[in-house]
Image: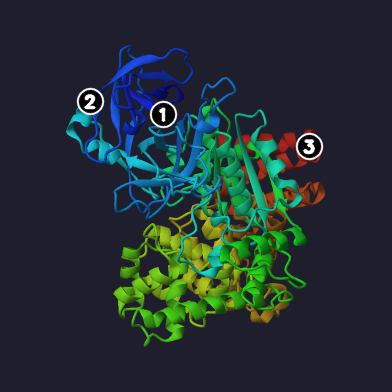
Amino acid sequence: MRLSSVAEVFGGRSGSGYVLAPGLVLTAAHVLADGHDISVRPLGTAAWVDAEVVWRGSGDVDAVLLRTREVLPGDPALRFGRAGSREQIACRATGFPAAAVLPDGVRDSDTFCGQTVPGAGVKDGRLVIESAGGPRDLAGSASPWAGISGAAVFSAPESFLLGIVEKTPASYPNNRLKVLPAGVLLEDPSFRTLVGDPAAHPVTRFGSVLHPPYETLPDNRPDSWLLESRYAVVDFVDDGGHLGTLTEWATSSEPFSVGVVTGAGGMGKSRLAAEFADRLRRAGWDAGLLNTENPRSWDEISSDQPLLIIVDYASRFAEPLAGLISRLADESPTNPVRLLLLERRMGSWWESVDRQTARLARHLLGLDMTMREAELGRHVEAATGSLSRRLGMSPVTVGEIKADRPLLIHVAVLLALRGEDAGRSGREALLQRLLDREVIRWEAALATHKLDHLHPAEAARIIALVSLVSPARDEAKTLLDTVAPHDVGKVVEWLTDVLGAEDGVLRPVGPDLLVEHLLETLPDLRSLTLRLLAARDTVTAAHRGRVFHLLTLAAQNGPNSRAALTAALARHLPELLDGDPSSLAAALAAADRTSLALSRAAQQVASGLSAESERLAEVRAEVYHLATVRNRKRAGGRISEVADDMIVDDRAEAFADLGRMLIHEGMSLGMLSRWGRALAATLEAVEIFSVLSGKFGNFGDRRQLAIALSHAGKFFRNLDLHDESTRFAKAATRLWRVLAREDPDQRDDLAISLTNLADTVCSAGRPAEAIPYGVEAIALLRAA
């Protein structure tokens, strides 16, 4: 959308319009009174320009094209979009509403920021747009948006023309407008000819790159959805003044900045970000959640307005995030761009992003905020008032509440309103009570859909499957036919009834904490997960990513989920290496690290992981750590704890394998600058190969010992332990001298060891001592 193409229209009534092409203005027909002169005034100009109608929509098409007598410049970047009635798409319309009249009677411009309402306007082929944060007064009061009729409605931030605002029924709430779709206009051949026969680009929820911060709560929904941040049912509570901190960051002078908000699950990160985005949108920003389900979003997200991009569960997207940060930093935007990342904790995912951007992410980090405390009293008051209004109930007195996170406080209040005393319950008890209510509801709906024969345990498995994958209805039919093949059509209708599918997508049973609890309490979660992932022709990469993401979250607190995650990783580890490495590393870290099956899978893929790949550095460290588990089991513990006469044959071989794995683990950790852990793994390898070399004296064991000594020396140096670093570097060099005399092919490694020794003594403050080592290394390399 180009602001200079927004136009004020007067034809007996005040309205709005948009200059599509040179001299052609699109507006609503009902703005023009019969026989009245027509004038147009583009935004930013003082003079009115006469115009006449050159095209009028037929029947109920409330639109006209005007040609101005003086040619006004059009929008050269204009693109028409076609939005489905089931989609929820962020949009904006700028016009001249009555509420924007200035004291001198001139109408100022204003922008309606909202989103399309799924399922509304289907019968008469119209779109309905709604402002989630706007006034909601019903009929009986004058609409503040009177005069915005004819305004062009654009998707945000991509700026596809979705249609124009037409006459809105008086019975509509003031936060809704009716839109004549662009697709209807383009069905008229005369209109198409006048505007240059443009194509209409499909704009869907999955085709959009930015989702609106808030969505409309469906009428048919679980109680648990009342607690979802995206529906904003509970009034926002600004714990600790976080909004002010975010606003200060957003309005800082940097053209591009990255922010990170962390906090435990249920602390309100997503709601804080959504509220912040909603307020920025009202201030003229394009702001919302990046559509991570659309792979093009990472490359296409941009705007000619100030832009806020939110990425929730950022750890799932370390690789594309690194690319996005690098791109946005290179573009030098003229308007502010802010990238807000939400995650439960900072950790390896951020290290991965920083590493992949060559430390650019660290330089651009302008906000690092952790949400730790919730103001209990304010949350109880907000939840009691908001939920009682939504449920049409009188507020109740809520007793003492033990919960300390906003989401759990809201759960306790909701249960109290439903007649349950859950105030003193802990996290698991609160979530179980809420889940019990959902179980009763979905089991009651089975009879309505003639599914009485479906066992409650099977119903719970199906709900868990949908919550794991969040499939579209058509995808659900295929998935259910694969893993739960009975009455698939009826089951999908039942799921639509109990979980809703306004935009064609079946939603999870509730917030992620509730989904995690459902998974943890499902007796055969391991079996369900393996059957689901085995359906390779049905489960997409996006489905698989969501499954592992939710299992990783649940595994951090639940043994049942950890067992399912571990089994899934053991079965599918090779194919997962092609996905996001940061997500895989997080899953491996959350799995059962004592599992022999997972250790075996790690061993099988370890040799194929390039030691030079920075992309897989985190994964490689986790894989080699897991691979040591099986070798340690075979070896029977640490070598120092085993009698010398027992270290023979297969056991000696097992220790040698363990030592090699430990060397690789240390190297991988060193690439991640985790010097302490890298040193610990490498010193155990030194211990192993020292014993094996002393006992058997074979060349291979002594060479592995030399490698381990060299690496240990470097890790000591990075920890500023210079005496130990020098001792190990000298020991490594002595051994490499012996090996090079026995095998001249080892002279290059001797030269590397001498160079490392020179670096070590320089770091220790003795540069003169380093010179002979450097000279000898150069001589060896020249002689090669």
Amino acid type assigned to the residue bearing label 2 in the image: Leu
Where is residue 226? Give x, y as percent: 56, 63
N-terminal label among 3 and 1 = 1
Q: CA distance from mark 2 to mark 1?
A: 22 Å
Residue located beneath label 2 in the image? 194
Q: CA distance from mark 3 to mark 1?
A: 85 Å
Q: What label does residue 731 carry, if any?
A: none
Q: Nearer the viewer, residue 355 or 714?
A: 355
Where is residue 48? Give x, y as percent: 41, 14
Q: CA distance from mark 3 to mark 2?
A: 84 Å
N-terminal label among 3 and 2 = 2
Amino acid type assigned to the residue bearing label 1 in the image: Gly
Where is residue 46? Give x, y as percent: 48, 13
Asked if 749 appears above or below 491 in the picture, the reply is above
Judge left or right: residue 203 versus residue 626: left
Evaluate if marks 2 and 1 touch, with contact meaning CB atoms under 8 Å apart: no
User: Circle 3: is it few (<14), some (14-19), or many (20+) Cα within 10 Å?
Assistant: few
Residue located beneath label 1 in the image? 15
Q: Residue at x 77, y 39 (%)?
A: 763
Residue located beneath label 3 in the image? 769
Where is residue 353? Give x, y as percent: 57, 45
Amino acid type assigned to the residue bearing label 3 in the image: Glu
Asked if 766 appears above or below 88 in the picture, the reply is above
Please identify, in this view, whether the residue under mark 3 or under mark 1 is nearer the observer. 1
Which element is circle 1 on? Answer: strand
